[in-house]
Image: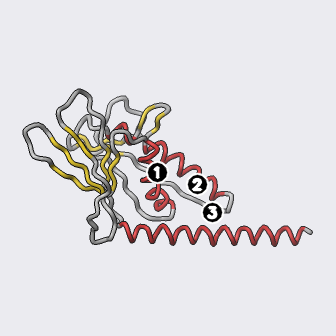
């Protein structure tokens, strides 16, 4: 009976390994289709009443050379023409932290699969970068959600005798200075270079 249980256990482990390899192949295929570089736009709600209007037309029908659909937003400010901007994905004002994380989670999975990954937020002061990346208590942003995902995966993989070494950095570039966001020893931001 013990021999039969060991065989069944080994069969289950083999099946799980095959499924994991299949998942990795699918992930790799998706990256080939969509490309390794993606540009997303998250629109922050207006802080005050504004005469500027942002619209989000239906999914653009224009295909890129990588055969993926893009999303477009149009911005109309008073006394100006309408400007259109196209991104791989647009998160309107009503988008949640969960929606943003669900989109970047595939990159975190790629990092766990051994790929080098960089996710960064770019924008003017007050545009919502910190909120998107860090969030607030009870409404966590990308960084805490990524950390939870990584450590949950580490726990899951450890059950299959896989070892996962984690190297992580979080930096901020502000006014041409680079700051280590993980250094809790200093009360003020100290430039790294």
Q: Considering the image in quadrants, where does the N terminus appear?
A: bottom right
Q: Nearer the viewer, residue 145 or 179?
A: 145
Residue picked out by circle 3: 162
Residue picked out by circle 2: 153
Task: Look at discs 3 and 1 and give the one toward the viewer.
Answer: 1
Residue 10, compared with residue 161, is above or below; it is below
Q: Is residue 86 left or right of residue 98?
A: left
Q: Residues within 10 Å of mark 1 (few under 14, many from 20)?
A: few
The furthest residue to the left: 79
Task: Look at discs 2 and 1 and give the one toward the viewer.
Answer: 1
Contact (CB < 8 A) between labels 2 and 3?
Answer: no
The residue sitting at 44% across, 64% down in the picture is: 115
Residue picked out by circle 1: 102
Badge 1 element: helix
Badge 2 element: helix
The residue sitting at 88% across, 72% down in the picture is: 3
Badge 3 element: loop
| Residue 190 at x, y percent in the picture | 30, 36
């Amino acid at each position: 009976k013990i021999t039969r249980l060991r065989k069944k256990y080994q069969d289950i482990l083999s099946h799980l390994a095959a499924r994991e390899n299949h998942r990795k192949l699918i992930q790799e295929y998706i990256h080939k289709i969509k490309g390794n570089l993606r540009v997303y736009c998250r629109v922050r709600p207006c802080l005050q009443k504004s005469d500027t209007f942002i619209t989000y037309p239906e999914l653009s029908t224009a295909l890129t050379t990588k055969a993926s659909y893009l999303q477009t937003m149009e911005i109309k400010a008073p006394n100006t023409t309408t400007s259109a901007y196209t991104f791989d994905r647009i998160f309107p004002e009503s988008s949640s932290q969960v929606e943003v994380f669900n989109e970047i989670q595939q990159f975190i999975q790629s990092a766990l699969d051994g790929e080098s990954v960089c996710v960064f937020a770019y924008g003017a002061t007050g545009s919502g970068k910190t909120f998107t990346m860090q969030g607030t208590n009870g409404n966590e942003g990308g960084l805490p959600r990524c950390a939870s995902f990584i450590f949950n995966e580490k726990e899951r993989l450890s059950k299959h005798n896989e070892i996962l070494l984690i190297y992580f950095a979080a930096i901020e570039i502000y006014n041409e200075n680079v700051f280590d966001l993980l250094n809790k020893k200093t009360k003020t931001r100290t430039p790294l270079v």
